[in-house]
Image: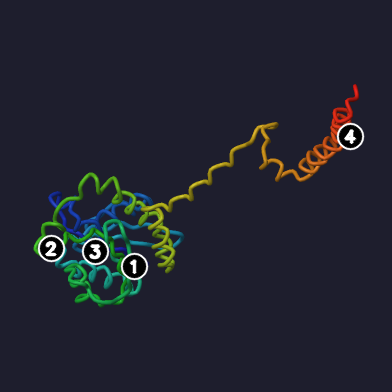
Amino acid sequence: MFLVVGLGNPGSGYAGNRHNIGFMAADEIVRRHSFGPWRRKFQGQVAEGDIDGIKVMVLKPETFMNLSGQSVGEVLRFYKIPIEDVIVLHDELDLPPGKLRVKRAGGHGGHNGLRSIDAHCGKNYRRVRLGIGHPGDKALVHGHVLGDFSKSEQNSWLTALLDGVAQELPRLIKGDDSAFMSKVANLVSPPKSKAEKPAKPVQAKGEKGGAKDNAQNPAAEKTTRKGDADGQKEDAPTTMAAALAKAFGLKK
């Protein structure tokens, strides 16, 4: 069994917070893959289902963010799930909005939910870091993470990111982290198609002319020059006869 943990704070007052993006991703996974109903258990809410023949449990701890590890630890001990089979979805200040990274083990980066899980369960789990962006000033961080996503954020990238995570979760379950990240990134920011080259103007038949056309048609140029030379040969005797007649006073 795999355990997928979405981090957030319980209660309607926190539901739309940036800090709750892990809860939002968990909800979308359960909806898209038609998991069973949410049940209160292990100090949180759990839903179970099957993804490509693999049993998966999704957990939303209700201990508040700072104590998330208590809930996660209970599930691991009850089902004897190894820490390597745990995937945690959480908000990430150090990634631009809509960006995503998968990381195994490492530090908690100041995230209190990860800090708690590290303390209760160990560190060798995969973290899906969901970028919410940094407000630019450390003093503004608290208000930023506990502030709601704006309508423009929801429309421009949040909905696409949550859809992508849920849709491509099977790749993550199978251990293909790189493909998971690539596919979700393409869903959030589809690659732009190459602009088509403008078509060359079609020249109407019979519009050729001038020196350029002759250069493109050497045969035509040769024919024209030959005709000019023949014309000069024909005119030469006539001109000579007229000159002699005038000199000797002869009538034509």
> Quadrant of the rendered structure where residue 222 is?
top right
Say whether marks 2 and 3 touch (CB < 8 Å).
no
Q: Amino acid at mark 4?
A: Pro
Say whether marks 1 and 4 touch (CB < 8 Å).
no
Secondary structure category for the residue under label 4: helix
Residue 190 higher or lower than 118, as above or below: above
Which label lies toward us, 3 or 4?
4
Secondary structure category for the residue under label 2: loop
Give the residue number, with chain letter if any, for mark 4.
237
Q: Position of residue 139 (x, y in %)?
A: 9, 63
Q: CA distance from mark 2 to mark 3?
A: 15 Å
Q: Taking 59 as reference, is 226 left or right? A: right
Which label lies toward us, 2 or 3?
2
Q: Which numbered disc flags the more N-terminal residue, 1 or 4?
A: 1
Secondary structure category for the residue under label 3: strand
Give the residue number, with chain letter if any, for mark 2.
137
The extreme left residue here reads 139
> Quadrant of the rendered structure where residue 21 is?
bottom left
Give the residue number, with chain letter if any, for mark 1.
102
Which label lies toward us, 2 or 4?
4
